[in-house]
Amino acid sequence: MSDFDIQLKLGRAQTHIDEFRTKAAIIRNGYCVIKPEEDQERQMTVMRINITPKASDELRLIAGDALFNMRAALDYIVTRAVLSNPPNTPSRTNQFPIAQDAKSFRNIEARQLAGVPDRMRAILEKFQPYHPGNEPLTILSKLHNPDKHRSLNLTAVVADSSHLVARGGANPFALVSDIPLCDGGIFGNIGIPWDLPEEFASVRTRTKNTSIEGKCTQFVGFSDLFDPEEEEEGYEGADTTLERILNYIERKVLPGVQPYLNSQ
């Protein structure tokens, strides 16, 4: 194994990211419909967001391939570190550790970094997510592990610009907004309780007769990184998320470990 193998994996990840971005752009223009729905769990009438077109299964596969190649590149670094420390040889347990706290790192260090020189172990510990600036590794782990072991990552469409018209209620209105609307989420994250006092019952009736819809622009993001039923900052396209992880590996991890990897 050579350093070139690591670069090949990262280059392949970039190819997948570029492909994802191109295919996601095809569904950039969408349509948003917000209609009342009876939420049995909450015992409320809510306004559910439905955005079309949806993200295709192909996009989920492409994203998974990008994550796989980035994770593999990190694991290759550990393999190279073992090979640079003869007479040690790589084992099946060797991998780039990603721990959320120092105790977890110590628990996995002996197994995942068997045969890795102490100086390299110290470098890899500095890259752990519990140190500020290493957050992309947390995201990589959160996205890659489910994709590898359980199921494909769920990707959701998010409207980042909407031109909507409300109809059917007492006061029709137009809405132009750049507030993110996540497919499957609840508009405004509010609902009308079923047990409203009688004098407010008309509010629920008007809500049930209201629909809001119109054109929107949208992007595809990782739903594993946000709750579609919570209003929050930080929505971003999956291609941006993937690019951020790749840049972190190329610009921070590789320069940090390169001096300690002897040519084999």
Image (cartoon, helix red, strand yellow):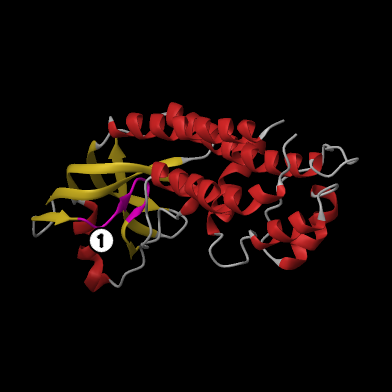
Above or below: residue 130 compared with residue 13: below
Crowd rating for badge 1 (residues with CA inside 10 Å; few <14, some 14–19, many 20+): many
Q: Is residue 184 magenta?
A: yes
Give the image location of residue 134, x and y in percent. 56, 60
Furthest residue to the right? 87
Between 39 and 257, the residue placed more toward the observer is: 257
The mark total stands at 1
Q: To which residue does mark 1 refer?
A: 204
Q: Is residue 143 magenta?
A: no
Give the image location of residue 123, x and y in percent. 69, 58
Residue 55 is at least partly visible in this image: no
Residue 183 is at least partly visible in this image: yes
Q: What residue is drawn where x is 44% and y is 60%?
A: 42
Q: What residue is drawn where x is 62% and y is 38%?
A: 73
Circle 1: residue type: Arg
Magenta span: predominant SS is loop
Give the image location of residue 227, x and y in percent. 45, 55
Q: Is residue 246 left or right of residue 208?
A: right
Q: Is residue 91 left or right of residue 18?
A: right
Between 104 and 223, the residue placed more toward the observer is: 104
Q: What residue is drawn where x is 25% and y is 61%?
A: 204
Q: Secondary structure at mark 1?
A: helix
Q: Which residues are magenta?
A: 178-186
